[in-house]
Amino acid sequence: GVSLEPTRLVVQTDARRLEASELVIAGPSTLAHGLLAPLGDDVAKEIAPRGPGVRAAGLDLGLDALPEGAAKGAVGTREPTYVSVHSATAELAPRGAAVVHAALYLGDRAPRPKEDRAAIEAALDRAIPGWRPLVRAERFAPAALAASARVDAPHGLAGRPATTVGALTQHARGVHLVGDWVGPRGLLLDAVMASALAVARSIEARRSARMSRSSLAESAL
């Protein structure tokens, strides 16, 4: 867990106690909430995601070969599916073989593994006819986390939690968040990278400010 001291933060793990002036929590909203919400209702409210998590059922395939005429990518127009042959642009399979990823976005509804897999396989049938006899390896995930929090109206990206937790941040200590659910920029990996850059800049600015205050204090002495 995380606890506060006047000039530092303390993180207690199963194995050790860590002390720091800056804490960065990089991960889904559930991780940040579990660590920080016990520190107060104002904190819990500040870091609460503005939309529900988004999950997807996914089917990863290793094929002995990619059938002739197969699409390299396809997106459903009547249902939220996608198919992508990732090995078409990256060396993910032996020469002649293929790695294919397909998914059905569930939104915030409960997974229905049998029905969801059937929908994914139907999308594969449309995009890559003849794929079934060529399967060498497969992996099905019935409810993978696709996005930590959906971006909802009325505020959109601007309504997401800030990358610095104001209720826990003072001159001597700071708590920051990195993830696809924080900050006003980007979605998915773009949001992760944008929030990480914002946090790095914030920590550097705070470090410089602390050093300046320390120099001024020494000069006064």
Image (cartoon, rainbow, N blue to C red):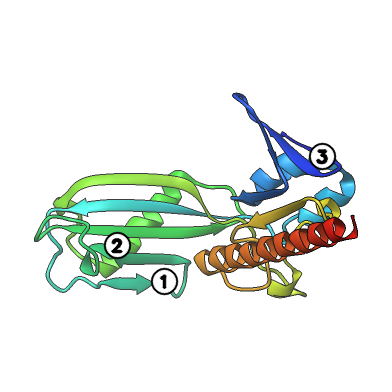
> Foreground mark, 3 or 1?
3
Residue furthest to the top: 15
Q: Earlier in the sequence, mark 3 or mark 2?
A: 3
Q: Is residue 27 left or right of residue 7?
A: left
Q: Which residue is mark 2?
A: 124
Marks 2 and 1 sit apart, C-alpha to C-alpha, by: 11 Å
First in sequence, mark 2 or 1: give its number: 1
Nearer the observer, 177 or 57? 177
Return the x and y of residue 188 as percentages of the image width and height: 53, 65
Q: Looking at the image, which residue is at 83% across and 39% down?
A: 5
State which quarter of the image contains the N terminus. Answer: top right
Residue 23 screen position, x and y as percent: 68, 48
Within 10 angstroms of label 1, few (less than 14), some, or many (20 or more) residues? few
Indicate the secondary structure of the residue bearing disc 1.
loop
Residues at circles 3 and 1 in contact by the CB criterion of under 8 Å:
no
Q: Residue at x 56, y 62 (%)?
A: 192
User: Label 1, on which residue?
Assistant: 76
Q: Which mark is residue 4?
A: 3
Question: In this image, 49 relative to 44: left or right?
Answer: left
Q: Position of residue 197 (x, y in %)?
A: 59, 67
Under mark 2, the amino acid is: Leu
Viewport quadrant of the C terminus = bottom right
Residue type, mark 1 in image: Gly
Locate residue 42 relative to residue 150 in the image: left or right: right
| Mark 2 residue element | helix
